[in-house]
Image (tube, helix red, strand yellow):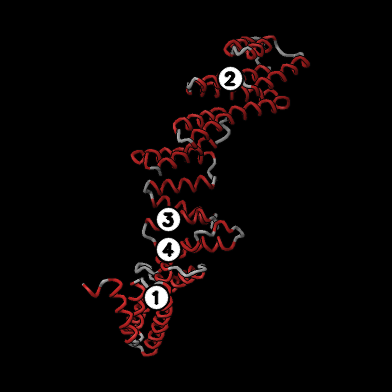
Amino acid sequence: MTKTRLFLLAGLLAAAAVAGCRSAHTTAAILYIDEQKYDKAINAIHEGFQYRDNEPDAYFYLGEAYSHKAEDAVNDDNFVEAKKNYELAYEAYEKCLELDAKDWEKEVDESLKYNYGNRLRQAKLDWDDGFYEQAEGHLRLAYAALPDSLTPIKSIARMKMQMAEQDTFQSQRTELLTEALDLLDQVLAAKPDAYELRVDKASVLDALGRNDEARQLYEDLLAEHGDDTHLLLNMAELAREQGDYEHAADYYVKVVDLNEADTDASNDADNKTMLIQAGIMYASPKVGRWEDGLKVLDRAANMELVPTENTMLLRLQTYYNYGMEVFNKAQSETDPVLKKELEDKAKHLFQRAVEIGVAMTNNFPTNADGFFYLSAAQFQLGDYDAATVNNKTYEELSGASSQ
């Protein structure tokens, strides 16, 4: 018998002596429990029910006897027997409260929490050590001990989601995710508005390739919780997987906006990376939102204390490529006013490309692409001498001149 239960039993025996109204069968059962003769305790209480079946004490100690039997079964690795006894213990405790909640609520609550907490603690230890089957067993026992709590079922689902992402379980990935989905649906049937579980469900649907269902659920959740950065990141990843780069970029930018608006500096580490990803997607041919692409790439650059090679090159490429698109539109424009506007805009973009290209080649003189785009922008501006010099450097660095 555990130390906690010994203290509890001693206190209740003392209370019984004061009360003086407990049946002989229940008193006998308490003594049997003290002697760790749990089956005899159960038999004594059931025998007493033939004479009196409305004694709350009897049902409480019946719950205690079944709880001890469940613990012994756990120690013997007999989880089927443990589950049965935890369920019987819960039924007995509930009957005790039904008869006299006022006097027994505290004791029943302590016993239920004891059974439930023991199994949750062991489940966490096994989960942390990678003993997933044992962890699931203890979580299912925790649910049997306290079915009012859906936490164990939720935890099993999340554990299976975690397992599905590991290389060790790739052959079982679909099976694990399907099991996780079934468990989440089980919990959501009881708690349909559980936000975090709905997010988990959307993630599982996404992982199973049920993208339309996942997207619809994400959109429903976003309508309710538009400022949840975790949700927005999930939606961004789903959008990327589906080739919807425009919305993926929008979600990344919104996450950065939210991160910068709060007072928690710890969530700002990935802001620059998200802005760069958004910039690349905005400037992709499929999206073509050049202005937004340049805006977020310039924003990413402003986050750097020291200019970095990758960011500078991305900005240089984007200014030049956008300039070429505008220049080509100008060539085909027949309205002289619009044509002049487009030509001026292209010139401005090429000038910005040159400014960034000069800074980049000064800071990173061995980057061939920097000289290539600088030369190309200078050529478009009519600065042929500088363009020729920088193109020659590009050829030397890239080996193009020897090919």
Residue at which label 3 appears: 237
Name which of mark 4 and mark 1 comes first in the sequence: 4
**What amino acid does circle 4 point to?**
Gln
Which image quadrant: the C terminus?
Answer: bottom left
Residue at the image position 42 percent from the left and 40 percent from the top: 163
Q: Which amino acid does label 1 sit on?
A: Thr
CA separation in Å, label 1 and label 3: 34 Å
According to the picture, the residue beneath numbered tag 1 turns out to be 361
Q: Is mark 4 on a helix, strand or loop?
A: helix
Instruction: Identify the residue position indicated by label 2 in the image.
Output: 68
Give the distance between the C-alpha atoms of the residues marked 2 and 3, in whole angstroms: 49 Å
Q: Can residue 300 be seen in this view?
A: yes
The three-letter amino acid code for the residue at tag 3 is Glu
Q: Which one is in front, 364 or 31?
A: 364
For the question of whether residue 289 can be seen, the reply is no
Instruction: Classify 10 Å Cα crowding around label 1: few (below 14), some (14-19), many (20 and above).
Output: many
Tell me whether circle 3 and circle 4 mark residues in contact (CB < 8 Å): no
Quadrant of image for the N terminus: top right
Q: Earlier in the sequence, mark 2 or mark 4?
A: 2
SS at mark 3 in the image: helix
- Of label 1 and label 2, which has the lower sequence position? 2
